[in-house]
Amino acid sequence: MNLLEISQAIRKVRQAQGLTVEQLAKRSGFSKGFISQIENFRQTPSLKTLIRISEALALPLSQLFADGEKTETPYTFGRIDEGQELRRDDGDQYGIRYMALAFPQIGRKMDPFIIEYTPGAPRDFLMHDSEEFFILLEGSIRYYLYDDSSPREMHSGDTLYMKANIPHRVELCPGCTYAKSLVIYSDALDTDIN
């Protein structure tokens, strides 16, 4: 199971139990922000963390992921315009929409997304514990790495390969009201948080 599947399984069970992120955080002993990062596929939880979360949900770890069990196949066909939309808690605020393209593929080592950008609030820097390949398909954006001092203006057809844990953020260029990218995240690096 990869980061995307883990995040969606935890969110699904939490919501089915009628728990808020804050309530799950208190029960598990983690911060609300950490639980939110896991559910929004920004943080890869360790096995120890998953055990604490499953205990907080009063479920054996195996049952937490039982709904997602499917037969693994070596390939999955799809369409770029038929991804599964994943709701992140802050996507609307920042004008960002995420469409998972390979969600049905079990045991995948990559997570490709179509990400759409519309006007929204400026986003804080974030970083992932996975590598990322970015292709701008439509529009014009400013891509910031590390800080706000030297943004790179990108246009349709431009690409970026980024190693794990590099702070970054994206914003639309002045005059641009829509941009669309294809982003592929690798499997996360092994980390043990908390």
Image (cartoon, rainbow, N blue to C red):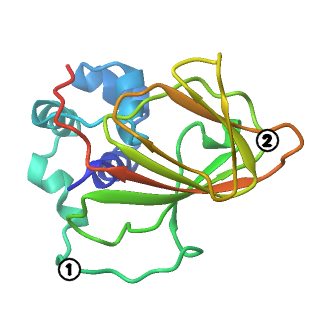
For marks 2 and 1, the one nearer the N-term is: 1
- Which residue is labeled 1 in the image? 74
Residue closest to the eye, 159 or 64: 159
The quadrant in which the C terminus is found is: top left
Residue 173 in picture, x, y percent from top left:
79, 39
Q: Give the residue furthest to the right.
A: 175
The quadrant in which the N terminus is found is: bottom left
- The number of numbered discs placed on residues in the rendered structure image is 2
Residue 158 in picture, x, y percent from top left:
61, 52
Name the residue: 39% across, 83% down. Answer: 77
Residue 12 in picture, x, y percent from top left:
37, 52
Name the residue: 42% across, 27% down. Answer: 166
Residue closest to the eye, 123 or 40: 123
Position of 106 relative to 18 (above/below): below
- Which residue is labeled 2 in the image? 119
**Amino acid under disc 2:** Pro
Residue 44 in picture, x, y percent from top left:
27, 37
Q: In what element is the residue under mark 2?
A: loop
Q: Give the residue furthest to the bottom.
A: 77
Position of 186 relative to 102 (above/below): above
Q: In what element is the residue under mark 1?
A: loop
